[in-house]
């Protein structure tokens, strides 16, 4: 005589689903924790940028920390010049204009002067000595999907200082560039670097109006991931109760 098959204990029906639900919960919690770590890192970066922007400018040295507020005096070479990035203003396609600043007794310094149209425009190229102020910018890491640079045409989409310097004929340039900043509402720097304005300014190139300040959405992302984790727990709990009752 065969023995009857025992009925499963209700909670046993939740064992296999739990092996699926728990890894999903772990992933959601891990993503939320990662965003909190990113939030802490981004807050520190923003604090450093704000402190650098508020500090008085110092003379360009051999290797200042990134985003240090610096100033440099010299003569801008009228040519050759390079274009960095790509930006449309109004109906005009342009990019950041990169020039070479020859300094007395110092190595050449690349200068990111600001936005200018790729063709045409009233781009000023001063002949005399100019004093420029901004922040120290080092080379960027090339993004995986970044457009391919064209050194022969001096068109660059990633700020690779060595490659740009070589295309401009200054392989001995400083290991960083001076990104010009002219805060809005202040007079233009000597040499005709006007304050930023919308669309096509009368004076070009159009420099940045402030230090770069990254977005900081990580708190919202963290709340989203933790909210999804909480919702997942509630959904699984309600489903588990229903399954146990069916048993």
Image (cartoon, helix red, strand yellow):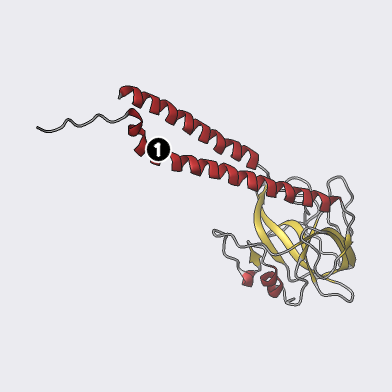
Q: Mark 1 points at which residue?
A: 18
Indicate the quadrant where residue 161 lies.
Answer: bottom right
Q: Position of residue 95 (x, y in %)?
A: 68, 57
Q: Using a 10 Å C-alpha cutoff, classify the residue at mark 1 as few (fewer than 14 neighbours), some (14 to 19) or many (20 or more).
A: few
Q: Is residue 178 visible?
A: yes
Residue 195: in sight, yes or no?
Answer: no
**Where does residue 6 sit, x and y in percent of width and height?**
23, 30
Left or right, 34 with respect to 54, comes to: left
Q: Position of residue 177 (x, y in %)?
A: 77, 65
Q: Give how far across and how far down residue 206 sits, in percent.
A: 77, 53
Quadrant containing the N terminus is top left
Q: Residue at x 71, y 72 (%)?
A: 165
Pick the quarter of the image with the C terminus: top left
Taking depth in this image into account, of 178 and 196 the one nearest to the observer is 178
Left or right relative to 158: residue 13: left
Q: Measuring 88% from the left and 56% from the top, which residue is drawn there?
A: 189
């Amino acid at each position: 005589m065969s023995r009857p098959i025992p009925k499963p204990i209700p909670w046993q029906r939740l064992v296999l689903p739990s092996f699926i639900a728990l890894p999903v919960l772990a992933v959601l919690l891990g993503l939320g924790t990662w965003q909190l770590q990113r939030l802490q890192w981004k807050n520190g970066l923003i604090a450093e940028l704000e402190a650098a922007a508020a500090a008085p400018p110092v003379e360009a040295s051999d290797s200042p920390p990134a985003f240090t507020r610096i100033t440099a005096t010299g003569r801008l070479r009228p040519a050759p010049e390079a274009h960095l990035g790509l930006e449309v203003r109004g109906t005009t396609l342009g990019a950041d204009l990169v020039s070479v600043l020859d300094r007395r007794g110092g190595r050449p310094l690349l200068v990111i002067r600001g936005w200018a149209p790729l063709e045409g425009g009233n781009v000023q190229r001063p002949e005399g000595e100019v004093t420029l102020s901004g922040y120290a910018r080092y080379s960027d890491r090339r993004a995986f999907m970044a457009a391919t640079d064209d050194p022969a045409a001096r068109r660059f989409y990633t700020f690779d200082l060595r490659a740009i310097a070589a295309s401009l004929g200054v392989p001995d340039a400083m290991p960083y560039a001076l990104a010009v900043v002219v805060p809005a509402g202040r007079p233009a720097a000597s040499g005709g670097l006007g304050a930023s304005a919308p669309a096509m300014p009368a004076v070009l190139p159009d420099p940045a109006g402030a230090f770069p300040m990254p977005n900081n959405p990580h708190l919202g992302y963290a709340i989203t991931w933790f909210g999804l984790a909480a919702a997942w727990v509630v959904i699984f709990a309600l489903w588990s109760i229903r399954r146990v009752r069916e048993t």
